[in-house]
Each structure stands twice: as structure tokens, then as C-alpha cells.
Amino acid sequence: MSTGIQDSLFDTPATADDAPTVHPLATGITRRALAADAWVDLRPGWLTGTVGLFDRLRRSVPWRAEQVRMYDATLPVPRLTAAYPADTRLPDPLLGELRAALTDHYRSALPEGFASAGLCLYRDGRDSVAWHGDRIGRGAYRDTLVAIVSLGAPRVLALRPRGGGRSLRFTLGSGDLLVMGGSCQRTWDHAVPKAPGAGPRMSVQFRPPGVL
């Protein structure tokens, strides 16, 4: 049964019966240069026919709730997650197709390719993730690429310079792709803020080997 998720704002309305289509990355992608040699690529509507994929992943992925230590209390992280390290089977063949397409397109910037996949489920607008940057190893950062495919209800992904500053806000619809590159993981943080009234949304993050 369909969850009634809205498809990308850049696409025509979709139903659960629409076949998923991966569109070319060579067209429709735009790059925004950020400070400190960071950049963001945005490809609206890269994947269409996403409703069925969202429903399959929501049902089949072994979602887990994480906890975080905050001062003297242990609090639940307001989202569900799942991790697929390099060389493990992805939960849906279509994710493998997306990873291969990203690896091929970004080969010159990322010779090692994309390896792992992480999934996050934002059950409604009360779920969120605070400001952070992806890291390699224990607390270390380096220039790398992280690709995010958004599924489900539109949500904002915000970026701001590390240490504070004016933030940028990208509203990602279902099937939209955002790639953070250059120094982005070293010099910028990103977050998904709460959005009262928003429906369920999922993000699929593809990362190179060793990036968490």
C-alpha cells in the first residue's frame, strides 16, 4: 500500500505503480560554489517513480534508534538509521544502480568511488538531525564527496560555515540529489531542522571508503 508520499517538486505526480527511472547526471545538475573551496551539486528529479522504493525501504530495512549522551542524560536521537558498509549487500538493487551512476559521474574527483550507504528515516516533521560534518576515522576530516538522495516528503537540508555564520537552505523533494564536495565536510556543517507538519522522509547517503 502506498504511503502517499509526494514525489519531487520538479516532477509530475507519481503513484506507487510508476516504474523508477534514473535520469542522466550529465544534464540537469548545477554546482554552487561555497566558501573555503567547498561546493554543492544539485540535481533535481534525478530519480523519478520513487514511491514504491520509499515503501519497500521503509518496510524492509532493519531501522534502529540511536541514543546520544547529553550532559547528564541519555536521549533518543530523533530519527531512525541503518548502515550498509562497503562490500555489504544493499537493501534494494536500485540503490546499487544509483551508487554505480554516482561513482561513474564523479570518477575524476573521487577515484576510489562511493562504497558505503547510510539510510535515515525521518518519521515526521519532529524528527531532525543537528549540525554536523561527516568524518573519516575518529574525529578527522578531509576533502571528500558525500552524495544524498532524498525520498519522501520535501525537507530542508541546511548548510552553514563551521564555527557559525549565515546558513543556506536547500529544499529537497523526492528523488532529488545533493552532493557535497571539496572542503565541505571540513569547513561546513549540515543539518535537517525540524519541520512541523511534514510527512515522512528518507535520505540515502553514499560515501567513499572510510567516511562515516
Image: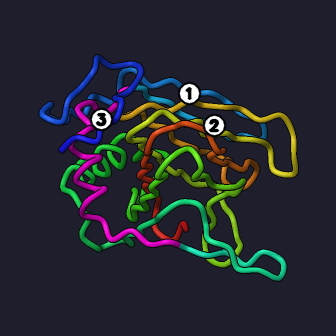
Instruction: Out of 127 and 22, give the one closest to the viewer.
Output: 127
Instruction: Out of 105 and 17, give the one closest to the viewer.
Output: 17
Q: Which residue is mark 2?
A: 39
Q: Which residue is mark 1?
A: 31
- Nearer the observer: mark 3 or 2; the answer is 3
Q: CA distance from mark 3 to mark 2?
A: 33 Å
- Nearer the observer: mark 1 or 3; the answer is 3
Residue in the picture at 25% in, 49% down: 55
Please report the bounds of the magenta region as a residue range. 45-65
Callout 1: SS: strand
At label 2, which amino acid type do we have? Answer: Trp
Image quarter for residue 101?
A: top left
Q: Which residue is mark 3?
A: 4
> What is the quadrant of the C terminus in the image?
bottom right
Label 1 crowd bin: few (<14), some (14–19), many (20+), radius 10 Å: some
Image quarter for residue 39?
A: top right
Instruction: Out of 122 and 157, give the one closest to the viewer.
Output: 122
At label 1, which amino acid type do we have? Answer: Arg
Q: Picture coordinates of residue 195 (x, y %)? A: 61, 39
Instruction: Check residue 70 for magenta coloring.
Output: no
> What is the quadrant of the N terminus in the image?
top left
Residue in the picture at 48% in, 33% down: 154
Label 2 close to label 1 by CB (< 8 Å)? yes
At label 3, which amino acid type do we have? Answer: Gly
Horizontal side of 151 relative to 146 (left or right) equals: left
Residue in the picture at 81% in, 50% down: 162
Colouring mode (rainbow / by chain / secondary structure / one colour): rainbow
Q: Is residue 56 above or below residue 61?
A: above
Label 2 crowd bin: few (<14), some (14–19), many (20+), radius 10 Å: some
Question: Tag 3 or tag 1, which sits nearer the N-term?
Answer: 3
Instruction: Check residue 50 for magenta coloring.
Output: yes
